[in-house]
């Protein structure tokens, strides 16, 4: 199961990377002009569209997987969710007890576990032999 990057994934990621650097520069230098405001609004819209694109590609590729592979990824997701959510909660409990958020550890664990378990489906494609 050799995988490689698809040009359909490289170009949007390159645009994401470059626009993130430009946005960080604008925010860090506190540049306030109409172009920078329009650029940041466009960047946020691009982020939402790029996230939607990655989710759609991941769902399309999930349909191509066997039930055994889906079960393996789901089990991996559950284990990672428990480990990451629990470690985040314990870290906050011992080191930041005044800032314990009831749902914060769940969202961080959920997002990280989903990303680690399923996002390779959105970024890579199988190489055809």
Image (cartoon, rainbow, N blue to C red):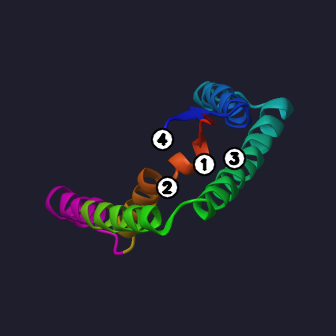
Q: Which residue is mark 3?
A: 47
Q: Is residue 103 magenta?
A: no
Q: Position of residue 99 (x, y in %)?
A: 29, 64
Packing grade of label 2 (10 A; few <14, some 14-19, many >=20) is many
Residue that label 2 marks: 118
Dot 3 or dot 4, earlier in sequence: 4
Element type at marker 2?
helix
Q: Is residue 17 left or right of residue 92?
A: right
Secondary structure at numbered mark 1: helix
Query: Which of pointers 1 and 4 lies earlier in the amino acid sequence?
Result: 4
Disc 3 crowd rating (10 Å Cα; few below 14, some 14-19, many 20+) is: some
Q: Is residue 115 left or right of residue 37?
A: left
| Residue 25 location (% of width, % of height) | 62, 25
Residue drawn 48% across and 41% down?
Answer: 1
Q: Residue at x 50, y 35 (%)?
A: 2
Mark seen at residue 1: 4
Residue placed under numbered mark 1 in the picture: 122
Q: Quadrant of the C terminus?
A: top right
The reply to whether discs 3 and 1 touch (Cβ–Cβ < 8 Å) is no
Q: Please give the range of residues in magenta.
A: 84-102
Whole-number angstrom distance, CA of label 3 to CA of label 1: 15 Å
Tell which circle, 3 or 1, labels the residue nearer the N-terminal end.
Answer: 3
Q: Residues within 10 Å of mark 4 (few under 14, many from 20)?
A: few
């Amino acid at each position: 199961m050799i995988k490689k990057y698809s040009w359909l994934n490289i170009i949007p990621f390159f645009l994401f990377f470059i626009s993130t650097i430009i946005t960080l520069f604008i925010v860090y230098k506190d540049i306030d002009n109409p172009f920078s405001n329009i650029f940041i609004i466009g960047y946020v819209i691009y982020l939402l569209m790029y996230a939607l694109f990655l989710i759609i590609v991941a769902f399309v590729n999930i349909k191509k997987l066997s039930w055994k592979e889906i079960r393996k990824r789901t089990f991996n997701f559950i284990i990672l969710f428990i480990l990451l959510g629990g470690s985040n909660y314990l870290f906050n409990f011992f080191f930041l007890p005044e800032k314990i958020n009831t749902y914060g550890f769940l969202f961080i664990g959920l997002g990280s576990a989903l990303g680690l378990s399923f996002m390779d489906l959105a970024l890579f494609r199988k190489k055809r032999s």
